[in-house]
Image (tube, rainbow, N blue to C red):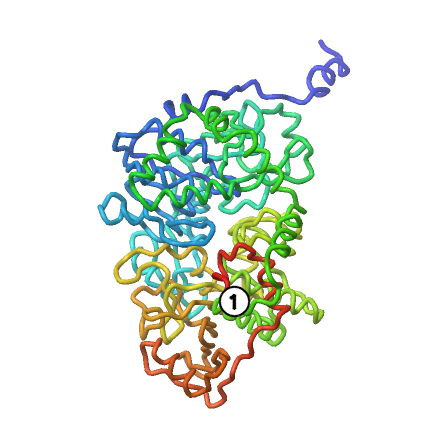
Amino acid sequence: MPSWKDLVATRFNALHTSTENKVMPLVEAVRTFVRPGMKINPCGLHSRPGAAMYELCRQFQGTDPRFEYIGLGLTATMLPLVHLKLIRKGIVSFAGDGYPTPGPSPVIVRALERGEIELENWTMLTICQRLMAGAMGVPFVTTRSLVGSSLGAELPHAFKEMEDPFAEGGITGVLKAYNPDISFAHAWASDPAGNAICFPPLAENAYGPLAARTGVILTAEHLVDTDFIRRHAHLGRIPSEKILSVTHIPYGSHPGGYYARGVPELIPYGNDYDFLKEHRRAQRDEEEYQRWVDKWVLGPPDHGEYVRKLGAERIEKLYSVAGPESWRLELDDFCRDNRSDEPGGAIERMVIQASREITRKMPLRRYKTALCGIGQATLATILAWHALRDRAYEFAVMAEVGIYNYDPRPADPFVFNYRNIPTATMLSDIFEILGLHMGGDTSRCLGVIGAAQVDRWGNVNSVRMGGQFVVGSGGANDVATAARETLVVAQQNRGQFVGDVEHITCPGARIGCVVTTKARFEKIGGNELILTGYMAQPDVGEEESIRRIRELVDWDLKVSSDIEEMEIPTDEELMLLRSYDPERFFIGKSAQ
């Protein structure tokens, strides 16, 4: 009979390390576990499984696998799947190009025109909620999003409005659970058994992998031992029991980057913006895009060759731009090459007027957070953040992918700028940001979003104009239906301000103000937008300004008896704005 000492020595002195070894080449993993007709989920952590998607393209090109795809978006590294006709149906919140500015993708447009793909439009939060329900094993979950929208009306198979059983007269939305067949995820590090760690912000989080019926094909920047995983167990998200295979894939999220902090072995790298721009340019012509796909997706036999094709110089640049202070050199270059006295253009004036409106609303209504969309909405919110900080009023700026209370860094206006991540006081995911901190019952959040089209009731359309698909809701519907109030920033051209939008992407009930390149519209004592302000212009009086604005509005526009001439931007406002968008992605070309 063994002694107690022997028992302790043999059973407890050493930690158990799994003997499972799921390591295999990515080509073998895809060949072994992926079958035509599957429901696939490329897990949208802040790193995306780009290498796995390219391998999917290589193995299924020229076939008709009719995959059903669920994820936050069909964009960037996901678009070759559409071009190669591998996806029968996309269940997404966004389908288009995201960088440098959000807009339609020719790849998506061509596929829709030919009937090669069906798009089912959801929102960022509701996709996460459906996957969460699938992971929980419950048939449905409730939501505040989609209620009263065209989005919800078009999804009767998986979304219902029902009476609240606990509040008489109340209405709630109900989402059907979704379980993908297989999920793909990219992690910072994994041991051979599939115990992996991922850094926040987590965006979609791991609900898709946890809901996947077959399991997860995992790629990882580093292959490590289990002791390394244990030391950083707080970063674990996907248990090894869900993992089908593990593949060591450095730069597996390219052209996306990967953030890390506090773990010396994990060195962050940034987004490859040059690559994304090249990819966007190539989409304009179908033959040119095929050449691009041949070069970067189908040409390299594996991801190792893909990385070698990128080259050491390009890879080194990704490390340098990931530095939290790397903006300083870029801003120095901008300040040296640009005049500081250049007058503001129409879009700049719009952004600054929107920022002034945010600056007024935040303390007046005691809002404590702001959730802003991509582009001009982000820039307006950032300027207001600076203005109110100077007045000792603080509020937290949030980005929907999971960045809370960040200190906005200049030189890069992209809302998911990696340099913002180290400045945040909390990193989480879409569910927490949109579902709790923006839309929670006790939250006091002002939403700021853009729009392709607005109507007299404040309803927003970003899905369909003239019968043509635009890009989808993203998180806009989530914001407009649940934030305390939402402000819209939109350029004002013919056909964009209509009596009734053809698709209610965002119901206008909580949209109280719209700021455009020409004017400010508000709801005052009613549900209809009226004109309360016009942009000051040299040698143009109030009467002529109102006439020009009315020509761009497709309804009988009411004008406030106390209409305001909105003052031109100050030089300091313009300089601060331009420091955030030096390449003028969102603020437009020079006024001169």
**Taking 72 as reference, is 83 left or right?**
left
The vertical placement of 530 against 464, above or below, is below
Q: Nearer the viewer, residue 78 or 570?
A: 570
* 86 vs 196, nearest the viewer: 86
x and y percentages locating residue 303 in the rendered image: 46, 27
Farthest left residue? 114
| Left or right relative to 159: residue 476 | right
For numbered disc 1, what is the local secondary structure?
Answer: helix
Residue at the spot 40% in from the left edge and 29% down from the top edge: 55
Classify the position of the N terminus by image quarter. Answer: top right
**Residue extending farthest right:** 5
Q: Nearer the viewer, residue 22 or 486?
A: 486
Q: How many marks overall?
A: 1
Asked if residue 495 is positioned above or below residue 20 in the image, the reply reads below
Give the residue type at disc 1: Glu
Q: Mark 1 Cα within 10 Å, few/some/many (few <14, many 20+)? A: many
- Tell which residue pokes out farthest to the bottom in this image: 561
Residue 450 locus on image (x, y percent) = 45, 63
The residue lying at 54 percent from left, 64 percent from top is 441
Q: In this view, does 48 lie to the left or right of 575?
A: left
Please report the residue visible at 42 percent of the width from the left and 35 percent of the height from the top. Answer: 183
Q: Circle 1 sits on which residue?
A: 348
Is residue 118 in view from this perspective? yes
Residue 542 position in % (x across, y down): 46, 86
Q: Is residue 374 visible?
A: no
